[in-house]
């Protein structure tokens, strides 16, 4: 295999930063050809100087002009600077790239994801929101354009590894593990939870939005839908168990009674590296798992009453069509409002539920239907937040 050329969408976020660390350790067999960022221009500049990509994309045209004004030369050519959604889409389909890490958070990542797929890229997929918004469309386009989708989520990476070489008709259940977040085993009154408390995840270091999703268990609800879409398994075959140690990342139960699981210390660099090097496995920084040192592995049933987001996500998935799109839109709005201290923690599922209850969905949506439902869900949820 020759040099693998990589574009990272969302290089200044948690996944993007970890991915660049992985690529640095992997050495000359990997070349970073493109980076993108929305807000953190200082970090993007630092990354650009270290990895020397051919092209970058930023959200604001004013930031693009500032980069262009510097007259940066890379490999003897002027640095290409793109901007806005169109720039992100162009970067995702960049001609010289063969692998695209899609780690832009939220619905904005959908069209760049489709651009990467339509470019026939190998896509390391960390943007779960884009997948649940338009799952059938994304998977159908990947099939049409012969693009490969490799999950970066630790749970779906685990499922992918356990399912590799297996026949789907022989799968009985997919079992996703959830840490439970910071509040699962505490007596904390959830309506009095602060932003600081909700961001204090016990085992994973992640971005702010996904950390709140982990605290509400919406993250796991979304992952149920993601697993069903990625692996072509019905929703009633996907289950969740609480596993506070976050060592067993997911399990696959087969019809003969055998169960396969993937275990490791909790570190996002492992699933990122697996997606970037697949189908090869190469040495990494992660210390091998010592079961004696781990000592205890606990598993519990989820508390659907205390954490209603799990049931809301499953319900939206069963309805299908644009309901998952609206679920995601309302959740993104509610989480942002909580982070800005405009609503309480327990208002997040309430706003999502009310938004879903008013949605008249489209069962087989086009891309335009999906984008329209996304905007509708954001508009209504914002009205409920202000209401």
Image (spheres, grey):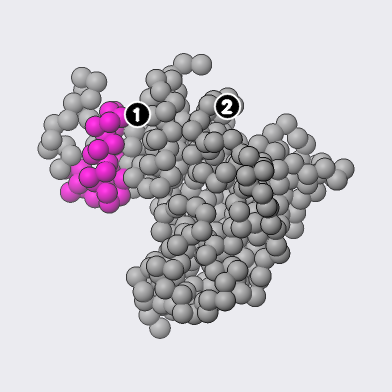
Residue 306 figure quarter: bottom right
Q: Nearer the viewer, residue 196 or 2?
A: 196
Return the residue at label 2: 281
Q: Residues within 10 Å of mark 2 (few under 14, many from 20)?
A: few
Q: Residues within 10 Å of mark 1 (few under 14, many from 20)?
A: many
Task: Say which mark, if any, is on residue 23.
Answer: none
Residue 300 in magenta?
no
Residue at position x 50%, y 52% in the image: 204
Lateral position of residue 48 relative to residue 165, left or right:
left
Which of pointers 1 and 2 lies earlier in the amino acid sequence?
1
Q: Secondary structure at mark 1?
A: strand
Q: Secondary structure at mark 2?
A: loop
Return the residue at label 1: 33
Residue 46 in magenta?
yes
- Examine the rendering and report whether any part of residue 261 can be seen: yes
| 97 shown above or below 138 | above
In x, y percent, where is residue 315?
Answer: 65, 66
Residue 274 figure quarter: top right
In x, y percent, where is residue 48?
Answer: 26, 34
- The span picked out in magenta is 37-65
In x, y percent, where is residue 298?
Answer: 69, 57
In x, y percent, where is residue 40?
Answer: 27, 49
- Examine the rendering and report whether any part of residue 360 can be seen: no
Q: Nearer the viewer, residue 381 or 340?
A: 340
Residue at position x 28%, y 28% in the image: 52
């Amino acid at each position: 295999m020759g040099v693998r050329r990589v574009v990272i969408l969302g290089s200044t976020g948690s996944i993007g930063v970890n991915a660049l660390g992985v690529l640095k350790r992997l050495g000359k067999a990997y070349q970073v050809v493109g980076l993108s960022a929305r807000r953190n221009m200082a970090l993007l500049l630092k990354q650009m100087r270290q990895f020397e990509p051919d092209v970058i994309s930023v959200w604001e045209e004013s930031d693009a002009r500032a980069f262009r004004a510097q007259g940066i030369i890379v490999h003897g050519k002027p640095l290409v600077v793109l901007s806005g959604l169109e720039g992100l889409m162009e970067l995702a389909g960049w001609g010289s790239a063969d692998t695209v890490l899609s780690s832009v958070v939220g619905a904005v990542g959908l069209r760049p994801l489709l651009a990467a797929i339509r470019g026939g890229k190998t896509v390391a997929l960390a943007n779960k929101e884009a997948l649940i918004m338009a799952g059938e469309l994304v998977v159908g386009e990947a099939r049409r354009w012969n693009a490969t989708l490799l999950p970066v989520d630790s749970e779906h990476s685990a499922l992918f590894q356990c399912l590799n070489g297996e026949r789907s008709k022989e799968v009985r259940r997919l079992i996703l593990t959830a840490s439970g977040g910071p509040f699962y085993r505490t007596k904390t009154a959830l309506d009095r939870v602060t932003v600081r408390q909700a961001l204090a995840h016990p085992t994973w270091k992640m971005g702010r939005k996904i950390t709140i999703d982990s605290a509400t268990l919406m993250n796991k609800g979304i992952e149920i839908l993601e697993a069903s879409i990625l692996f072509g398994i019905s929703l009633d075959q996907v289950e969740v168990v609480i596993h506070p140690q976050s060592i067993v990342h997911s399990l696959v139960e087969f019809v003969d009674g055998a169960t396969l699981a993937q275990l490791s210390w909790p570190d996002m660099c492992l699933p990122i590296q697996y997606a970037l090097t697949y189908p090869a496995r190469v040495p990494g920084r992660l210390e091998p798992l010592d079961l004696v040192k781990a000592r205890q592995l606990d598993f519990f049933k989820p508390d659907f009453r205390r954490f209603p987001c799990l049931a809301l996500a499953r319900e939206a998935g069963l309805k299908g069509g644009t309901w998952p799109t609206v679920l995601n839109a309302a959740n993104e709005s509610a989480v942002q409002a909580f982070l800005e201290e405009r609503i309480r923690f327990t208002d997040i599922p309430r706003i999502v539920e009310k938004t879903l209850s008013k949605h008249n969905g489209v069962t087989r949506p086009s891309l335009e239907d999906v984008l329209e439902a996304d905007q509708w869900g954001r508009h209504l949820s914002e009205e409920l937040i202000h209401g």
